Image (cartoon, rainbow, N blue to C red):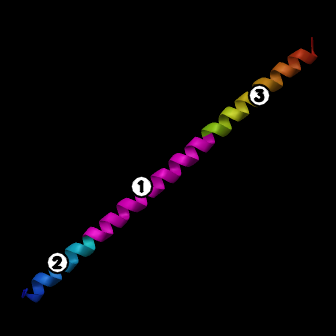
Amino acid sequence: MYMHPAMLSEMAASKRRDMLAQAEQDRRAKQLATLARAERRAERAQRRVQKATRLTLRLRSELNQ
């Protein structure tokens, strides 16, 4: 099937834009997942610090009694 060169060029440009948009969307999704993992790790670390602080305070109070 014959297509005018201008039409072929426009189709190629459109496909290229679509592929770039998809790549950007994939990159952002991966970045979001990475940030979510980092946030969960930070929250776990914060809970560990709080637990350790409570334990330290409890043990100190037991020593002072």
Could you tell me which secondary element the residue under label 3 belongs to? helix
Q: Measuring from the top left, give residue 19's x and y in whole percent.
A: 30, 70
Magenta segment: 18-42
Q: Residue at x 26, y 68 (%)?
A: 18
Q: Measuring from the top left, give residue 28's x and y in whole percent.
A: 41, 57
- The mark found on residue 11 in the picture is 2
Three-letter code, disc 2: Met
As drawn, which residue projects farthest toward the front?
1
The residue carrying pointer 1 sits among few (fewer than 14), some (14 to 19) or many (20 or more) residues within 10 Å by Cα, namely few
Circles 3, 2 touching at the beta carbon (< 8 Å): no
Whether residue 2 appears in magenta in the rendering, the answer is no
The residue carrying pointer 3 sits among few (fewer than 14), some (14 to 19) or many (20 or more) residues within 10 Å by Cα, namely few
Disc with the residue nearer the chain's start (3 vs 2): 2
Residue picked out by circle 3: 53
Q: Residue at x 57, y 48 (%)?
A: 38
CA–CA distance in space, label 1 to label 3 = 36 Å
Quick check: 36 above or below 30?
above
Residue picked out by circle 1: 29
User: Position of 21 compared to 59: left or right?
Assistant: left
Q: Measuring from the top left, give residue 27's x and y in whole percent.
A: 42, 61
Disc with the residue nearer the chain's start (1 vs 3): 1
Three-letter code, disc 3: Thr
Whether residue 40 appears in magenta in the rendering, the answer is yes
Q: Quadrant of residue 65?
A: top right
